[in-house]
Amino acid sequence: MGSAVYLVLHPEAKQFFPLIVGVSLTFGVMLIIPIGGADMPTVISLLNGYAGLSAAAMGFVLQNKLLIIAGALDGSSGLILSVIMSKAMNRSFTNVLFGAFGQVQAAAAGGAEAKPVHSATAEEAAAILSAANKVVIVPGYGMAVAQAQHKVRELYDILTKKGVEVRFAIHPVAGRMPGHMNVLLAEADIPYDRLIEMDEINGDFPQTDVALVIGANDVTNPAARTDHSSPIYGMPILDVDKAHTVMVIKRSMSPGFAGIDNPLYYLDNTLMLFGDAKQFVGAIVRELSGGH
């Protein structure tokens, strides 16, 4: 700020401009580093807010009213959304910004212990889904990376034709930005009334035959309810562990974005389906359709 003020007063001191840029970049990196991975949707909203405020400031400099108004709307909406996202995770905004430093690394180091898991093939998964009455699909970032939403639509269609009630559990911070899963599922023409928000569907998991988790990690981690030392403790999660059977499609046992282990994977009622989400869901669909 001192360099900026000096440069305004002495425009000929151009050597201060690279200094301002360098300090700003350093400050930006240092601001983001302490924030835990599970809080990244909040950070994205915050950075969008910063960009809007920067645009508004530029509007004042250029005396451009349109830029001022657009920047102010973008900046205020980004900051408001950041606060809303923090509340959705049962966290204070200051805790999101400054509360996770040093915790994620320690949690990740403590989660390296090898534990037995139960795995299943696409054929076994198809048989379990076919015998179910109520199925809840939990989409996550892994589905987005694999671009599996259209295969998920095929799975929804074939299960529905078999008389299975299929719904989708949407966590407010699933993915990398607010509404990420809603957009992807809408792109695949999933009926909107099948997308159920976390607060509404959590009470139904004990009566759910199968919870199919596709690439969602931190938003299904029961440590958020029980482990006081966890960096995501207190964050509302989808209670998939309460379903009769949980099936998790995941490439490997590596931790999610928050860098912490997920006890869900080691429960007796959990089956791990290892592989690419798009390919594995496609294999399940082929099994359900008789191998065609």
Image: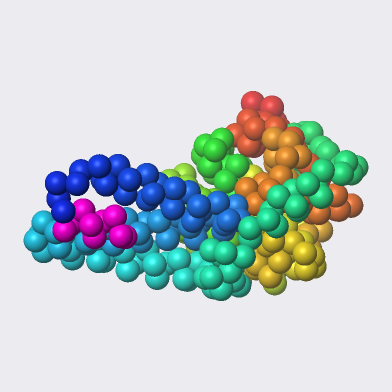
Image coordinates for residue 263, horizontal then vertical, percent: 81, 54
**Height in image: 12 above or below 194?**
above
Q: Is residue 126 visible?
A: no
Q: Is residue 3 left or right of residue 58?
A: right
What's the residue at 57%, 46% (across, down)?
141
The rendered magenta stretch, by its main secondary structure, is classed as: helix
Depth order, front residue of 188/84: 84
Picture quadrant where residue 36 is located: bottom right
- The picture places residue 167, in percent across and down from the top left corner, at 61, 58
Residue under the point 34% across and 67% down: 77
Q: Which residues are magenta?
A: 1-9
Q: Nearer the viewer, residue 191 or 174?
A: 174
| Quarter that holds the N terminus | bottom left
Q: Quadrant of residue 158?
A: top right
| Left or right for 74, reference 103 | left
Q: Position of residue 74 (x, y in %)?
A: 29, 62
